[in-house]
Image (cartoon, rainbow, N blue to C red):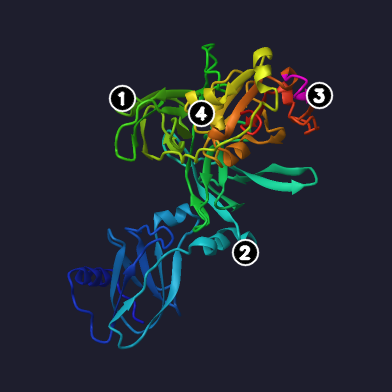
Amino acid sequence: MRTVPFRRALLLLTGAALGAPTLPGQSLVTGVVRDTVSGRIFAGAAIELVPASAPWLSGFKARSDSVGRYTIPDVAAGRYIVGFLHPDLDSVGLSQVSRPLDVRAGKRRVSVDLSPPGGMALIALLCGPAAGGDGAVLGRVRAASDGRGVQRGRVTVQWALPNIDATGLRTDRVERVTQVADDGRFLACGVPTGVPIVVQAHAGDTGHGSSSGAVRLEVPEEAALLHRDLLVADARADSSSRPMPADWSATTPLRGTARIAGRVITVNDAPHAGARIIVPDAQLEVLTDSSGTFQLAGLPPGTRTVELVTIGFVPQRQVIDLRPGRDAVVRFHPLDRVQELDVLTVRAKRDLTGFHRRKRTSTGTFLTAEDIARKNAYSVGEALVGVNGLRYTGIDPQTLKPAIGGRFNCSASFFLDGVSVALADIDGMLGVRQIGGIEVYTNAWEAPPLLTTGARFLGPDGRDRGAPNLNSGCSTVVVWTKSYVP
């Protein structure tokens, strides 16, 4: 095949753009450059067509237009290699994507679309064959101030893994740590798809330097690959002695000069007032006004999580990039109402647990079915927000409902009808209309002897139900359905 000089190639490409005919006996090669997984177009990609027998020669060149289409005229019959370059390829760790192409004699037009490998093919290419069946998270760790890639650091990815052993069902936490390359790139392989994961970036040496927030993400099952850049920044700790809401943890909040502003609307585009907009890293929140808008300043820069909680609607979470001294726009829409369960009719005749008697004599905090109804709570977690001895810890990634911990940054113990369970299991199994009463004790030792004997929990039948979590004397929450407390 003849080598086309640069000036000649430029004239040919210009002529093709103006509709110039292909020379007799030669073919027109055309196609679209795009990502087959996401459907995203690669505009401005550099396409090159070279002879397969001599790929070092300078072959035909073209560039994709705004809709990703490219055209190469006057290509003689033969075997070629066609590939493309694009800045976005570098972000996923690929330098070039190419494929073989046969141009047959007498064929006036040859169509060949170009795209990077998708799904598990790309996972195998980046992570190796051993990573088959798992997903990956990749991107760049950048400074929030100027967007440049950091030269040193690490990215941690965590997720929960349910396990069953002789003691019953437990949840283990798995952590994957990957180092950041000199240009800020990172690649975490062996990450599960379709489940919540927690990702956090750290710049500099271990334990030092700037960081991002611990944000909750999810690798899509169909693509098996999640690309997400993470912004890191130094955030100062707020050591002021101002009072904080009772449902916040005792950890020190972070501060900075970033700001957010946005609006909350419902499914019919109506503004929603009174929604709680929360930035957990800063332990700051604001309520939307009558027009559904909100503003919040003094936030730490970096990639952070913003949450929305409002009664009667499904909680929402967004991962946003906050930059020093700049505004970030956040929009929550549309709000979806929580699904209401059918009314449950219970024919219990009496209190089988002594709940109402303890409510009169005990030092714990008690919520009756009427108390929960007045709060218009849509889950047990929502009903417990603001209760003395407990703290709100964010939105549970599995149930998308409020998660609750003990007052002193510890994990509270939860029991349902005398059985030790997790709050996520209660909220996953029951609607609040099925709850007859809830007892809250600041620590396990404050629970009356009827409920605990030493460190053992007793159900209403008096049988030993097992040991509650007594970590640092953490709070104990006992939930009764209407079968036990009518």
**Disc 3 secondary structure class:** strand
Question: Sequence-wise, which precedes: disc 4 or disc 1?
Answer: 4
What residue type is disc 1 on?
Ser
Residue 421 lies left or right of residue 76; in this view the side is right
User: Which label sits on residue 290?
Assistant: 1
- Residue designated by label 4: 280
Question: Sequence-wise, which precedes: disc 1 or disc 3?
Answer: 1
Image coords of residue 283 (percent x, y) = 50, 24
**Which residue is depicted at the point 54% across and 11% down?**
241
Q: Quadrant of the rendered structure where residue 80 is? A: bottom left
Real-space Cα separation, disc 2 to disc 3, in angstroms? 54 Å
Mark whose residue sits in front, 2 or 3: 3
What residue type is disc 3 on?
Thr
Residue 29 lies left or right of residue 457; in this view the side is left
Viewer can see residue 153: no
Looking at the image, residue 287 lies above or below residue 29: above
Quadrant containing the N terminus is bottom left
Mark whose residue sits in front, 3 or 4: 3
Real-space Cα separation, disc 2 to disc 1, in angstroms? 55 Å
Real-space Cα separation, disc 4 to disc 2, in angstroms? 39 Å
The magenta stretch is 447-454
- Give yes or no for residue 314 being in the magenta stretch: no
**Which residue is depicted at the point 61% across and 32% down?**
482
User: Which label sits on residue 47?
Assistant: none
**Which residue is depicted at the point 61% across and 46% down?**
178
Tell me whether the residue at label 3 lies in contact with that at label 4, contact meaning CB atoms closer than 8 angstroms: no
